[in-house]
Amino acid sequence: MKTRICQAKDGIAEAVSLLEAGEPVALPTETVYGLAADALSPIACAKIFEAKGRPLCDPLIVHLPGNDWLERIAIPTPLAVALADAFWPGPLTLVLHRTALVPDLVTDGRDTVAVRQSAHPVFQEIVTAFGRPLAAPSANRFGRISPTTAHHVIAELEGRIPLIVDAGPCPHGIESTIVEVLEDRLRILRQGPVTADDLRAFAPLDDTPSGVSAPGGMKSHYAPHTRLLIEENPRPASDRHGLLAWSGNGKGFSHVERLSANGDLREAAANLYGAMRRLDAAGLELITAEPVPESGIGEAIMDRLRKASAR
Ligand code: TXA
Ligand code: MG
């Protein structure tokens, strides 16, 4: 299969007709590029798993065209509605009880479904024109780094999908926050752009481990091929030693990628995956990542670095 990249202004109609034909299409969201397909069609969703090499036990996020779809897909509690009102469209995914409309393949047969509404204008235009929810995991091969540009999607899925709609780099650059909505508490399953402090304003957080398993929550995920270690004040150890820099000057390292020139954690999140990909492509023996402050979105960055370093 030949994979084409279309600029957003030319690609929207074609993306919609491919989705209508039950094909998966890579689309930009405000977090990372997603591989989208008709969430209500098991056959279309099966093509997502196939293209990604993703195990069927890893359920998909359902992206809603609008709030009116929430009750058709999930059983929203008052707390869920308050969160949706506050953060949608945006980078927050809610895990809620599901309705019978959702195919078992999407949820791996669970009684819950993960739902969100993307704030990306191109994604919104496509899902609105399509008129039904889109299942969309990150558009990478299973276990690999999420794509934040159309070029990254090519590197992951060329020859496996028909179309990538290119709208430039994703603004957040890191996947949505996933929250399990419990009766009167919230449990964060994946850290992301909506932070723990943002969520605490709505309900207390439950720190006990979740009974549900989420492969994106597995210890080793988001992994570059090159070994990655996290270290404070690292020193170059060989002539093929790369640095993912936060505060150090990078002197003596053979390849340096700086997350942010002025210590901005949002900018660091947006740069993280592209920097990891460039380091991974540089033929290095080892990548060392300097830790970033664990506040705000820094928690999500450290979560991804720890997963990238777990082998
Ligand atoms: O920002 C994002 O969330 C991106 C964009 C494309 O929306 N999507 C994304 O999807 O990161 P994915 O599939 O790469 O990660 C979603 C995670 C997976 O780890 C999956 O296991 C978990 O969400 N998940 C999905 N449904 C779930 C459920 N019912 N209960 C618990 N975890 C669930
Ligand atoms: Mg993913």
Image (tube, rainbow, N blue to C red):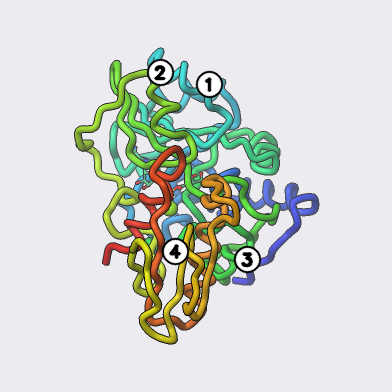
Name which of mark 3 and mark 1 comes first in the sequence. Answer: 1
Asked if the residue at tag 4 contacts the one at tag 1, i.e. Cβ–Cβ closer than 8 Å, the answer is: no
| Residue at mark 1 to residue at mark 2: CA–CA distance | 10 Å
Taking the view exactly as shown, the residue that stands out farthest to the bottom is 239
> Residue 151: which numbered mark, if any?
3
Classify mark 3: residues with Cα within 10 Å, few (<14), some (14-19) or many (20+): some
Kind of residue at disc 3: His
Query: How many numbered marks, from 0 up?
Result: 4
Kind of residue at disc 1: Ala
Looking at the image, residue 307 lies above or below residue 130: below
Looking at the rendering, in which quadrant would you find the N terminus? bottom right
Taking 308 as reference, is 175 left or right? right
The residue labelled by disc 1 is 86
Taking the view exactly as shown, the residue that stands out farthest to the top is 78
Asked if the residue at tag 3 contacts the one at tag 4, i.e. Cβ–Cβ closer than 8 Å, the answer is: no
> Residue 202: which numbered mark, if any?
2
User: Can you tell which quarter of the image residue 221 is in?
Assistant: bottom left
Name which of mark 4 and mark 3 comes first in the sequence. Answer: 4
Nearest the eye: 252 or 304: 252
Asked if the residue at tag 2 contacts the one at tag 3, i.e. Cβ–Cβ closer than 8 Å, the answer is: no
> Residue 141: which numbered mark, if any?
4
Kind of residue at disc 2: Phe
| Residue at mark 1 to residue at mark 4: CA–CA distance | 32 Å
Name which of mark 3 and mark 2 comes first in the sequence. Answer: 3
